[in-house]
Image (tube, helix red, strand yellow):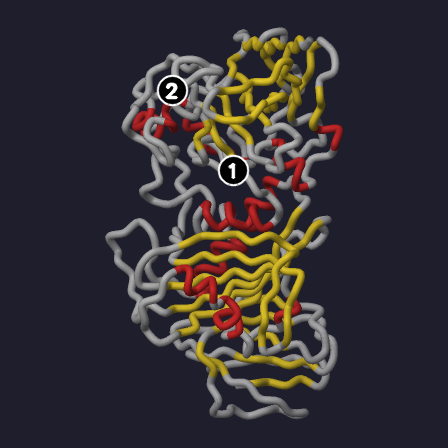
Amino acid sequence: MLLHMESPTNLTVTNISGYAYTLEFSTNLTGWQSMSEAISGRSPGERWILPTSEDSRGYFRTTGSTWATPVTNALPGTVLRYPSSNPAAPEHYRVAIVMVNTAGPLSDDPNTPYLEYYTPRQLGDLYFRHPHGVTSFYQDASYGHMSLSGAVVGWIEEPEQDLTPSAIIANKDYYFSLADPYIRFSDFDIFVLHARIKNGGSQVGWLYPFQSITTPQGNISGVGINFMINSTVFDKAPLDRSNWSGGDGILPTTSWAHELLHTFGISGHANSYDCGTQTVSEVTAANPIKAYGNSFSLMGESAYGLHPDAGMKETLGWLASSQLVTTTSNGIYEVFPLETADGRVKALRVPLVPPITNNNHSMAFDHLLIEYRQPLGFDRYYGRLDGSTFLSAYKPEGSVDKDGVLVLLEYPTNVTTDATLLLDMNPGTSYNPTRGIKWPGNAGKFADAMLQVGSNFTWNSTSITPLGTNALGGMRISVSIP
């Protein structure tokens, strides 16, 4: 049923079970409240779909200058709108999630920890509204600099067929265009194609604002695109520091936030630098660079932390230049927790002379990046290091002295990447060499990667020693450079 409003009025809609409603406004609407959805300040002529039972997956649409009656052209699917929870954020993106099913009938298996079937409402609420969802993560990690709003369209049912992820990606224009009856494409900055296929999967983030989509509404350029094909959906984030059997740190999963970070401009990953029983060695049997090996970042293994490192935050514009200090003289510097929105210094850049090299790669790493983390916000899993079932699976001791700083290598400026490499400041401690996330043993080996208070790392004439926290909660770090 469509309700067409010529002027603001009070309206109560009843008997709406199994339907959704499209409203078109000929005047600005000051407020509308229905089905727990608040709508305000909509523009004249803008369509707004109010969901009811997603299981019915239908709504009716027509046009007219008076109250309209139901018509027969029912459209499959539902569209749900999610306004920004932080409209004052300096950087705002509008995200459209299009849910397409090509896998045939879907049903939920209660024996799996994730959802095999979920409604658009469930997915949208997890992504845009959940305190551990993607939108909340970006609010937290960006210090309120970034906010998201958007819409979810789905499920759009396609004929059951066997498709590969590459076939979905190659035909993106077709699949996004299925949302044409529901949304105005020009209203959005980021488009997420969440497709269900019978086999395989793929998660890819294409850079904003350099993508385009050809739709029945014309060519939509200057956008970003995410492909979340057969991507897992959890409906809870474990808070007991135990394991991932009941959920993930970011909902629907960390991958949804990870790929979006690529779309926002992060090209690299949070890696580790594994030199065996040494923190740094210029001669190793294998390449020490392990992709995704940083266990403290969503761009890596995300076992003990989710915030991207300070270098990536600088790339994204979340840190001011004054918050990432390059050391130019010997002295004691202060670094404050990476997670807190306080405007203070979040990391140090320390030059390395000579740079670190290795016989298995051609890089010459000439800077260290030093940051200080605490179990706050989306870095709450840093608390797993105090002792947890989760940690015990990777490191038999079951607890770690986390009072210290993380030390990373940054790539030289002549290499176009924002990737970083976590150094292991305690390379001789024990760990489970067979249990892993991205790499066997990595999550255990790097669980105690931090340089602890009172310990020292020296590379030629460069020396770093954490001294402990000050009265304001910042870590004092003694730095000597050539």
At 62% from the left edge and 10% from the top edge, which residue is drawn? 462
Instruction: Look at mark 2 in the image and give the residue it sits on.
Output: 285
Three-letter code for the amino acid on which mark 2 is drawn: Ala
| 232 vs 225, nearest the viewer | 225
Instruction: Look at mark 1 in the image and give the residue it sits on.
Output: 269
Image location of residue 176, percent across then percent down: 52, 69
Quarter placement of the C terminus = top right
At 60% from the left edge and 74% from the top edge, which residue is drawn? 48
Image location of residue 242, percent across then percent down: 35, 34
Q: Is residue 193 above or below residue 143?
A: below
Marks 2 and 1 in Cβ contact (< 8 Å): no
At 60% from the left edge and 17% from the top edge, which residue is drawn? 355
Q: Earlier in the sequence, mark 2 or mark 1?
A: 1
Image location of residue 432, percent across then percent down: 30, 23
Three-letter code for the amino acid on which mark 1 is drawn: His
Q: Spatial distance from mark 2 to mark 1, Cα to Cα?
A: 23 Å
| 57 vs 277, nearest the viewer | 277
Give SS at disc 2.
loop
Image location of residue 23, percent across then percent down: 61, 80
Q: Residue 430: which quarter of the image?
A: top left
| 84 vs 360, nearest the viewer | 360
